[in-house]
Image (spheres, grey):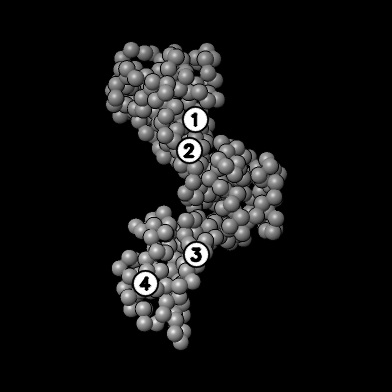
Amino acid sequence: MNNEKLVIGMPAGSLANASRGGNLIKLLNSAGFETKGYENGGPTEFKSIGYLFGWDGRPQEFGSQLGIQELDVAIAGADWIKERVLELKLEYGTDVEIEEVLPLNRGEVRIVGIAPNDAKDNVNDVFNDLCQTKELITIVSEMPYLALHWAQEKLKAIGRFEDFKNFSVQKYKTPSKIDKGVVIYETWGKTEAKVKNGGADIGIEITQTGSAIRNYKLKIIDEIMVSQTGVYINPILKKDPHKSHLLKMFLLNLYGSVDAENKVIIFFNVSNESMPEMEDYLRENQLFADEPTINPGKTHTQLSIQVDTKRHHLSLAQIRFELAVRNAVNIDTIPIESSISSINVLEF
């Protein structure tokens, strides 16, 4: 569409919501890609970056758009990317290669198979029972082709695929197009209610905690995948030198913002006579990599250490207290917006 700019699929819906979307807007701002209009539903503009073009859309559609190169880059969940790739393959016989180039460590959900509480616990046993009692296996899902692929893999595992190889993907409770096989009813939510009330044999649900599934007195019979938000491309983009260069710039800065989350730098001063004890403490508690940053002075030395507050075995409060006990003064804690060790963090 645009030969000069990097066209980025900007996900509408929960990802655009500052309170629900894992702070995607803040992440972009920290990376240096401040947006205008995105938080209000679009059109999205990148305020200070003239070579990025925002294409507002639904993550459900981005896989197809990447496939036809309508988009160069898309920010989406792995589940919806896989759904579109499977639809193109299973329904249209078209293979599309989509590559995740950067996970964003947010928006994690589980895609699970669900069944009534009286169903067998083992998913293969559930499918065996259905094959023995049904001509049509009915499944409800917001992701019908992911559901179809899952069902076909389970049927192959129990040796019944040939008996149930015919399939139909259709809207909920429309007349079946096949006499025997797998019917996938595409729904717009409340999958649990349809399974609970006998509207389908089994279902596929998107969940974080599983609480809604339990509330409906259903059980999880299989975990199909764990999905999180990431940055996706059509690999053919790498063959375009100009856009590949823009992509690396975009990814490197996004990586820096993701890597900086929950990290702080602590600056503090220590009298020179207390330095040996301080260095021992920092080393023993793994509070620096190769060595701490040290600026020696006449009577005091300034040090700085980087701390990941989510991963370190000591809490930030405990670290600051231990520094003070060892005669550190002027202890300042600064949040980090971006942390890039080198360009080698990119995998291409």
- Give left or right: position of 3 versus 248: right
Residues marked 1 and 2 touching at CB (< 8 Å): yes
- Nearer the viewer's eye, disc 4 or disc 2? 4
Q: Amino acid at mark 4?
A: Arg
Q: Residue at x 33, y 78 (%)?
A: 276
In front: 20, or 161? 20
Residues marked 2 and 3 touching at CB (< 8 Å): no
* Percent x, y of residue 347: 46, 59
Residues marked 3 and 1 touching at CB (< 8 Å): no
- Nearer the viewer's eye, disc 3 or disc 1? 3
Whole-angstrom CA distance, mark 4 to mark 2, is 50 Å
Can you say whether 320 is above or below 161 in the image? below
Local SS, label 2: helix
* Percent x, y of residue 266: 46, 67
Q: Can you identify the residue that label 3 sits on? A: 333
Whole-angstrom CA distance, mark 1 to mark 2, is 8 Å
Q: Can you identify the residue that label 4 sits on? A: 326
In front: 314, or 99? 314
Question: Can the viewer see residue 80?
Answer: yes
Among numbered discs 3 and 1, the one appearing first in the sequence: 1
Q: Residue at x 29, y 24 (%)?
A: 121
Local SS, label 3: strand
| Residue 36 tag number | none
* Percent x, y of residue 81: 51, 40
Local SS, label 1: loop
* Percent x, y of residue 107: 49, 42
Residues marked 4 and 1 touching at CB (< 8 Å): no
Q: Amino acid at mark 1?
A: Met
Can you say whether 34 is above or below 62 in the image? below
Q: Amino acid at mark 2?
A: Asp
